[in-house]
Image (tube, rainbow, N blue to C red):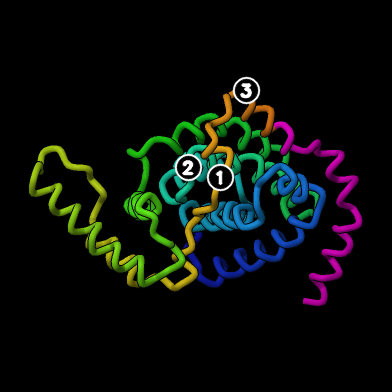
Amino acid sequence: MTEFSEITQRHILEKNDFFTADFLGSYLGKTLLKNGIDEETIRTITYFFVEANYNYYLRVPKRWTKASTERVLLDEFPRHVAFSVEEARYIAPTLINYVIYLDTIGYIKNGSALKDAISQANPELIKNAGNPALYGPGKKFALAAIKAGIDLTNKKAIFEYMQEYNEQFHQDFENDPENYDDFGDTGDLDQQVAEMADEDLIFNNFDNQAAAAGEDSELQAQEKEKENIINFEKAKKNIKKRRRLLKKRGKKK
């Protein structure tokens, strides 16, 4: 049975950084940017998708399956990534365009099947993104910090808020041990934060003007998603030159 390898993990994540940079300059990536999904969000989504497929299911990109893709979308994104429900709507359009891109350049061969899996999982993904019962302790802490106005790129502010957070947690438990909000093992959360590098503290806390002004109707959201999803054949035609350029870059590396 395949075992986890830090070398393999590092390799596929470095490759993902390279591919995502090229993807952002392609027709597929530019379409997402034009539809209001910012570059940092796209990078976060592709990075976590690659990382979670390997960390939880030992699937490198060339071995992604419909099943592992579905589990990452329905279980790992809702559990670990601090997206609101509105922000979670960006995940499927981004990944659909990304797997089409990876298939087009020949890095994976099942882009069409993965595209279908992502589309099918999207309604439940949105539903799960709004279900706090599915959130992991790290995500619950991040969302609580965001709500409290904490800058998640400021390590000092994170540690200070951690103390308040833990004190409130224990106070809630003492006041009503039978009915308290279970944020998980806060001792474990302390350890996780202590081990974080500075860049690990950068959660997706981007502004969403549409959400502030009021959520779009379900129909409007579906229409926006359709705008972000590109026809497979059209993508191939627009990306041929970039594919040749990418191969040249890879040889230089």
- Element type where label 2 sits in the image: loop
Q: Are marks 3 and 1 in contact (CB under 8 Å)?
A: no
Q: Is 16 covered by the magenta stretch?
A: no
User: Would you name the residue on which mark 1 appears?
Assistant: 208
Q: Are marks 2 and 1 in contact (CB under 8 Å)?
A: yes
Disc 2 residue crowd, few under 14, some 14–19, many 20+, Cα 10 Å: some
Query: Closer to the N terminus: mark 3 or mark 1?
Result: 1
User: Which quadrant does the C terminus fall into?
Assistant: bottom right
Please name the predominant secondary structure of the magenta segment in the image: helix
> What residue is shown at x 63% (from left), y 33% (from top)?
119
- In which quadrant of the rendered view does residue 191 lie? bottom left
User: Would you name the residue on which mark 2 appears?
Assistant: 84
Which amino acid type is shown beneath numbered disc 3?
Leu
- Element type where label 3 sits in the image: helix
Disc 1 residue crowd, few under 14, some 14–19, many 20+, Cα 10 Å: few
> What residue is shown at x 46% (from left), y 66% (from top)?
153
Query: Closer to the N terminus: mark 3 or mark 2?
Result: 2
Question: Magenta segment, which residues?
Answer: 226-253
- Kindly report the distance in space between the C-alpha atoms of the residues bearing marks 3 and 1: 19 Å
Q: Is residue 150 left or right of residue 22?
A: left
Q: Is residue 218 left or right of residue 17?
A: left
Disc 3 residue crowd, few under 14, some 14–19, many 20+, Cα 10 Å: few
Query: Seen from this angle, which residue lies furthest top?
Result: 219
The x and y percentages for residue 111 are 72, 43
- Kindly report the distance in space between the C-alpha atoms of the residues bearing marks 3 and 2: 19 Å
> What residue is shown at x 72% (from left), y 51% (from top)?
108
- In which quadrant of the rendered view does residue 23 lie? bottom right
Q: What label sits on residue 219 in the rendered view?
A: 3
Between 117 and 234, which is closer to the camera in this rendering? Answer: 234
* As drawn, 155 above or below 2: below
